[in-house]
Image: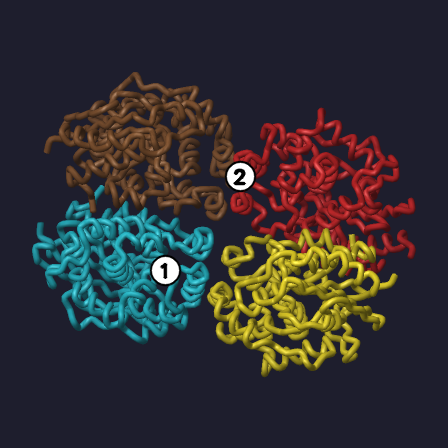
Chain colours: A cyan, B yellow, C red, D brown
Amino acid sequence: MNYQEILEEIQEEVRHMLPAGKVATYIPQLSSISPHKFGMAVQTIDGDSFQVGEAFEHFSIQSISKVYTLALGFTFEGEKIWNRVGLEPSGTTFNSLIQLEYEQGIPRNPFVNAGALVVSDILVSHLKDPQPSFLDFVRQRANNTYIQDDPLVAFSEGQAGFRNAAMANFLKSFSNLTNEVEEVLKFYYFHCSLSMSCVDLANGFLFLANKGHCPWTNQTVLTASQTKRVNALMLTCGTYDAAGDFAFNVGLPGKSGVGGGIVAVIPNRLTVAVWSPGLNKKGNSAAGQYALELFTTKTGVSIF
Amino acid sequence: MNYQEILEEIQEEVRHMLPAGKVATYIPQLSSISPHKFGMAVQTIDGDSFQVGEAFEHFSIQSISKVYTLALGFTFEGEKIWNRVGLEPSGTTFNSLIQLEYEQGIPRNPFVNAGALVVSDILVSHLKDPQPSFLDFVRQRANNTYIQDDPLVAFSEGQAGFRNAAMANFLKSFSNLTNEVEEVLKFYYFHCSLSMSCVDLANGFLFLANKGHCPWTNQTVLTASQTKRVNALMLTCGTYDAAGDFAFNVGLPGKSGVGGGIVAVIPNRLTVAVWSPGLNKKGNSAAGQYALELFTTKTGVSIF
Amino acid sequence: MNYQEILEEIQEEVRHMLPAGKVATYIPQLSSISPHKFGMAVQTIDGDSFQVGEAFEHFSIQSISKVYTLALGFTFEGEKIWNRVGLEPSGTTFNSLIQLEYEQGIPRNPFVNAGALVVSDILVSHLKDPQPSFLDFVRQRANNTYIQDDPLVAFSEGQAGFRNAAMANFLKSFSNLTNEVEEVLKFYYFHCSLSMSCVDLANGFLFLANKGHCPWTNQTVLTASQTKRVNALMLTCGTYDAAGDFAFNVGLPGKSGVGGGIVAVIPNRLTVAVWSPGLNKKGNSAAGQYALELFTTKTGVSIF
Amino acid sequence: MNYQEILEEIQEEVRHMLPAGKVATYIPQLSSISPHKFGMAVQTIDGDSFQVGEAFEHFSIQSISKVYTLALGFTFEGEKIWNRVGLEPSGTTFNSLIQLEYEQGIPRNPFVNAGALVVSDILVSHLKDPQPSFLDFVRQRANNTYIQDDPLVAFSEGQAGFRNAAMANFLKSFSNLTNEVEEVLKFYYFHCSLSMSCVDLANGFLFLANKGHCPWTNQTVLTASQTKRVNALMLTCGTYDAAGDFAFNVGLPGKSGVGGGIVAVIPNRLTVAVWSPGLNKKGNSAAGQYALELFTTKTGVSIF
């Protein structure tokens, strides 16, 4: 199978439907992106890579960063991490403080905002200098030392982030945040503000397709079992309230961000990253999700 | 009827059961108060006053201050205030963020914490210098220029107040807070930290027994109708999740605070304030509520 | 003060605004009533009675019957009744199964549907022949042996009552219903289907204005303390989610029904019943509530 | 790879830990089963079959039947079925009426009880004679005309099923049940009461491993796409509130029942059914889930 041809076919089929969905508008840095953007990149564990469209253009990875924080937090805490955050799907609209109150401050999983805040807290506790250390971890995974955060994005999100601040304070009231609320929020907005390209993300998630081993650094980031756990979590909880729909339509573990990026993992084979800023009603990239559906259809790789 | 004798009888009957309940422990300034304290004061609209026990000793009025903020906010906003805060009982355990989320950021009433935060926000908007202006308002109502806030109490509450901070941020996320979260919280903790005695409170609530007219300053603080509204709210929502119980057992509009104070109003007749720091399970002064029950029984003034 | 004149003034002021509100439509027997109907009756404990409009016309008392079931249940169980049903306001929209689940099958108070079902269950357990026995109790209170239930109303409500059936089964799953679900529902719909006039209701609630003593039968139905409890509950929970509003605007303990009736109690003085089928948004008779506001304004009897 | 050897190894490793978990006790027919029972069966799409332990012994399939009702309902309604039931995970403890109320009567997915009731309602509408027709469908899938329901189980469940009755009435109140509540419940308890063996289930789920094609009857039960949908749903929602855990530990689409059975599907390869009545805290067979973990470990078939 020729991945390059497949990517080009997908680009063709997706292009004409652009702009699909609606670009996120809650901060100016996201709302100003053209909805006509589309890029896609594949990276195999055998070392082949393929790209199409704006695959090298940077965008805000947003919630995709939660996979990195989880992976790094996992290396520090091991299975103990599940004492502070669950690993079950969240059941949607209950994304929110209702569920957190009902479950006494233990977020449902590491990908809902509350769960990601707890993981951020864990990293703030373990890392001497959280921001550069985390950035370094991401750069190593992606094999690209030029990856940067975007302080303007982080600042804007902080300005608009009253619900996250509510959540962080609420977690603290349940003693499930050990550092200062402000510090955790700051780190949270930092890691969400990273700018990466499809190529960066396809490279940067390869360790999850490779039993936890990072080829560029030759490091074992996670054990095979931990890797399986992260992938299972991406499948069941990686795409907000559309996990069931994504599981069916794409059939791969994946993580989306409100910046329009989605990365999916085909264990033992490859990673595929896509970017298009227009979002569907569930908050996932509309053209991006469709492109991944086409990818699994054309390659026949769905797990179901 | 001789109020002095009645107060002395009550003191006698209550004394032997002290310490009743459990002193609040979430900040050191409250937990260090002796549970043996008991004071009570009556102030009639005819100008008579009666006291017993530690009726002149200062204590932290806490949530009782929410009646003052509501009264003052009411003078600024009139009936418009009900666009931002409801006037129905809260149904208890749902005191919390669940209800706020369910009702899209409109707190149930001005006496639940979320509602008091909205009222604080209103005062911060209207008062040029919120803290001294509010203090002045309370001093005038109570006819005592020596009333002070307790900065240590305010500071300690802020330190422990993650749930309030969560609430304030949550309100802000629903656009039901116009000022900065920090500023509103600061003012909220300020007004809760006021130190007053039973005598101060009996004096200070007299305008509510007097159709809104404050005798000491000869000012009409609220209209008769607004006064009726505040009293009705105290009856249905003034004692946390025990409003139904308090309505039955005491049968008067009243407001309690976690510092152990309770003030009740007998419209057109008198006010009665009581203080004893041990709290019952619902967070109201145990001996205080019992003393008020005895007071209504002995005077026969219950409204039911 | 001349009550007859006051009633006539009220009739005059209310008539021109009829039809106010919207007649209940969920069963044909209610939806067919003319919204122009209006009646009002006063009964004093001194034996005087006053009427205006259609004060002798029968209508479906619906939820007003819950005061009778509570009173009768109270005579059987005494204070033990509060082990199975709460006595705090319900906090509105949470009228429903959410609250029941959250509080493990203990309804908030005897006037929400779930609470009334539990009280019905208590009566089914205590009464050998529940329907005639209960009817007899109501007839004695109202001093009218001609009062009847309306089987067609009961049948129609049963047909449409899936939420009540859900509630009853849910209560049963929490073991807070001892009899068969069907039997409890049947009795519940029976007591809601009673047809009474304003005069019947004014007479029939007089024992609650009279310390529990029923003048017609010379029986002590409830103790003075139990009577106070029922009145307090009517004030805090008697008018659905509008208890706070009703407490302020009317300022009396009262109970409304979806048939357009409202009865209010002025302890130690009188009862006043009003009927007009058009309902406001909160489910209380629109003209009826306004008539009661006028009544308390004109007589100056509000408790606040 | 030799599946027979693998099954025998698993039996060996599991046997010594029996009885694991706690047998369901809410009806006598389940509570009387020995917790020492263990059986397992594999059926490949190539026609090979393997068994170990009590693989031919019948047990109550309970919730496993919901996969059959969904499959059959899917053939009648196609994608329209998703108008009446969702396809996202339920977020656990919220299994219940809270979520149903919050989401206005649309159950989260077809495997929570409320969702299965809606699917039952659909079948009652489409099947002239629901019970024998459904039984026939299951027999054909499992290639065994001797499969029977257990009326005693169905009766006992009905006796204890107040929460299900609450749910059905609640669905009806939202107009998401078209047939009589009693009729739907009766059919629901019927299909949960089917008695099948591990061999029956391995055979009976083979069409889901085979792109929807049933080898015994040579019928296309579901399209390939519909089959994928059912498998995706089993992965994300098939094991109650443990879907995340099951996805990680077993890594296969699967459906469990409170009778101790679990069936899992490896698309395009095989089905594997296991039975052991002791349940873990999440309500899934303890030894059964462990056996499936061992199976995926030993065969290396996990999808992650």
Report whether D265 appears left or right of A179. left
Front position in the image: A4 or C247: C247
Outermost residue on the front side: it is B16
Residue hosting label 2: D173
The three-letter amino acid code for the residue at tag 1 is: Asn
Residue hosting label 1: A113
Circle 1 residues within 10 Å: few <14, some 14–19, many ≥20:
many
Q: On the rendered image, what quadrant is the N terminus of chain B found in? A: bottom right
Q: Is residue D129 placed above or below A183 in the rendered structure?
A: above
Report whether A63 appears left or right of D46. right
Q: Where is residue C156 shown, x and y percent of the image? A: 63, 33
Outermost residue on the top side: it is D146
Looking at the image, which residue is at 70% across and 41% down? C79
The three-letter amino acid code for the residue at tag 2 is: Ser
What secondary structure is marked by label 1?
helix
State the CA–CA distance, disc 2 to disc 1: 34 Å
What secondary structure is marked by label 2?
helix
Q: Is residue C193 placed above or below C87 in the rendered structure?
A: above
Looking at the image, which residue is at 74% across and 45% down? C261
Q: Does residue B183 appear in the picture of this structure?
A: yes
Q: Where is residue A146 shown, x and y percent of the image? A: 17, 73
The chain letter under disc 1 is A
Tell me which corner region of the image, top left, top right, bottom left or bottom right, holds residue B20.
bottom right
Circle 2 residues within 10 Å: few <14, some 14–19, many ≥20:
some
